[in-house]
Structure formats: structure tokens, C-alpha cells
Amino acid sequence: MAFQVTDGNFDQEVLQSDIPVLVDFWAPWCGPCRAMGPVIDELATEYEGQIKICKMNVDENSASPSKFGIRAIPTLILFKGGEVLDQTTGAVSKSSIKEMISKKAL
């Protein structure tokens, strides 16, 4: 299951992580976000120990999405060493997320 991050722990859990981190910026009212939820949880299980997979509810946390220019959801951002490696917006397939992770983070 994906780890829930907040504005309060974003720096520690994402930017200061020793391993790459994929953050799913989402909201409960967003249909495409809800559709991607199970895929994100599957990826969290598949990549456990290699990549941290996190979800951030943009309705409950505004500082971090604002800092990274999130204007549409779902948005996935891949971080490594505190830097943005890649980003995608909209509902995307599991295979394209895996491709992004393998090309940029592993």
C-alpha cells in the first residue's frame, strides 16, 4: 500500500529519502485519481525496498503541490536525491509508470 505523505513530512519522506520516491498527487473527488489508486498500491508492493511510493491528498495539503506547480491531478512526480527526475499528469497505464521508474530511477 502506498505511504501517505503530508506537507508536514514531505521534506523528510520525499526530498531526504535515501531511495527514489514516486509521489501521486490526488484528491478523493477525482475520478481518474481513484481509478489509478489500485495501480499505485500495486506498484508500492512491487517496488518495496527499491522505490518509495507515496500519495498526497491535494485537498488536505496545499504547500507541497503548490511548490511543485501541480495544476492538474492526478500528477505523478518521481524524485531522487531531492530532485525531480520526471513527471506525468493524467491517468496513465501501469506499464508507462513502470517505464518511467526503470528509465529514470533504477
Image (cartoon, rainbow, N blue to C red):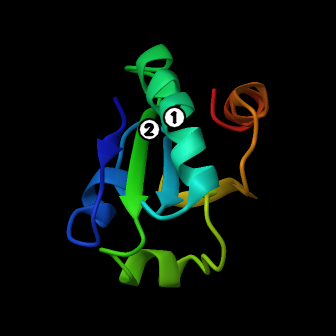
Do the CB atoms of the residues marked 1 and 2 lie less than 8 Å apart?
Answer: yes
Q: Position of residue 76 (x, y in %)?
A: 61, 53
Q: Amino acid at mark 2?
A: Ile
Mark with earlier residue (1, 2)? 1
Please say if 29 is above or below 66. Answer: above
Seen at 63% across and 35% down, the residue is 105
43 sits left or right of 106 in the view: left
**Depth order, front residue of 50/55:** 55
Cα separation, mark 1 vs mark 2, equals 7 Å
The residue carrying pointer 1 sits among few (fewer than 14), some (14 to 19) or many (20 or more) residues within 10 Å by Cα, namely many
Please say if 78 is above or below 27. Answer: above
Q: Amino acid at mark 1?
A: Ile
Residue under pointer 2: 53
**Depth order, front residue of 103/70:** 70
Q: Secondary structure at mark 2?
A: strand
Query: Residue 40 shows which numbered tag?
Result: 1
Residue 80 in sight from this viewpoint:
no
Seen at 27% across and 64% down, the residue is 6
Image quarter where the N terminus lies is top left
Seen at 67% across and 53% down, the residue is 85
Q: Position of residue 4 (x, y in %)?
A: 29, 49
Q: Position of residue 13 (x, y in %)?
A: 29, 52
Residue 17 in sight from this viewpoint:
yes
Number of numbered markers: 2
Seen at 72% across and 48% down, the residue is 91
Q: Nearer the viewer, mark 1 or mark 2?
A: 1
Query: Residue 54 shows which numbered tag?
Result: none
